[in-house]
Amino acid sequence: MCLPLAVIPAMQHSKNIAEGATATLALTNRTGSWQPQDTEVLVTDRKLNGTAWFVQDARKIDRLLVCAKKGTGHSLYWVASDAPGISVHADRIVDLTRDQAHVEFLDVEAEEVCEDGLKALEQAFPAIWTMLAADVIGAAEWQLQTTTEYARTRTQFERPIGFFHAVKHPLVDVMIQIDEAKSLVYNAACAIDHEPRRAAEYAHMAKASASETAAFASSRSVHFHGGIGYTWECFVQLYFKRQKHSQLLWGDAAWHRARLADIVLGEIGLN
């Protein structure tokens, strides 16, 4: 997922992106932790060393915004994707609409753009989670509409398959799930501008619901298309794979609910 402008903490770098440059975040460790403080990248004398894992669109972007450990803190560093010392190793993933890789840094010179990287990312994450949740809901809408149309035209036992309760009722459940997640996405998006103190709380709710929607809409769309839903010729399989990636990207439903519990109930010690 390419970087939204809200993540870039310096105006000159936002200007570069607005003029056509693209960027992505590099902060995840090898275990897939979405907590930036768990990064494996270290900085010494303004040089980056280590590996950032699960970097989205790593071979499609111009720059990387890297979260690196600096002493006892964490800073953000701006670096060109083709800078000397950077090695990009593509991951084999099921989602063919995305490009994921792990990126190695070996004495890579980088520009520090934010000394308190954790605070900057904390402010930016609600927008990232909300944008990804919106992507999921848009894809789920397509899955619902496409599957509903197929249920109207595909016949079995001399009737459209949508006639049967075993098909129509689950499709209604998909619609209800989409509406729930969509409402939470709208609320999270509004909070970024109007309730910034609750933006993280609402974004956690939106992404948790969206992750469940991704799984449910995908399973029903493929199931009700029957054998053709698994074929290369049918776009349903492309949406299924993207949704499964989005379901886990930047945290699945369980992860976001655990973070939400930390906000509402206080730290509960879950990783």
Image (tube, rainbow, N blue to C red):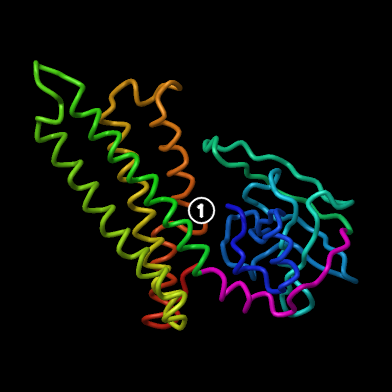
Instruction: Give left or right: position of 270 versus 72.
Output: left
Residue underneath mark 1: 249
**Outermost residue to the front:** 19
Residue 113 within the magenta-colored segment of the rendering: yes
Residue at x 35% of width, y 41% of height = 142
Work out whether 51 lies above or below 100.
below
Picture quadrant where residue 183 is located: bottom left
Work out whether 271 lies above or below 212.
below
Q: Residues within 10 Å of mark 1 (few under 14, many from 20)?
A: some
Q: Which amino acid does label 1 sit on?
A: Leu
Residue at x 20% of width, y 23% of height = 153
Picture quadrant where residue 23 is located: bottom right
The magenta span reads 108-125
How many numbered dots are placed on residues in this image?
Answer: 1
Work out whether 65 lies above or below 174.
below
* Label 1: which secondary element: loop
Residue at x 69% of width, y 54% of height = 22
Residue at x 63% of width, y 76% of height = 120
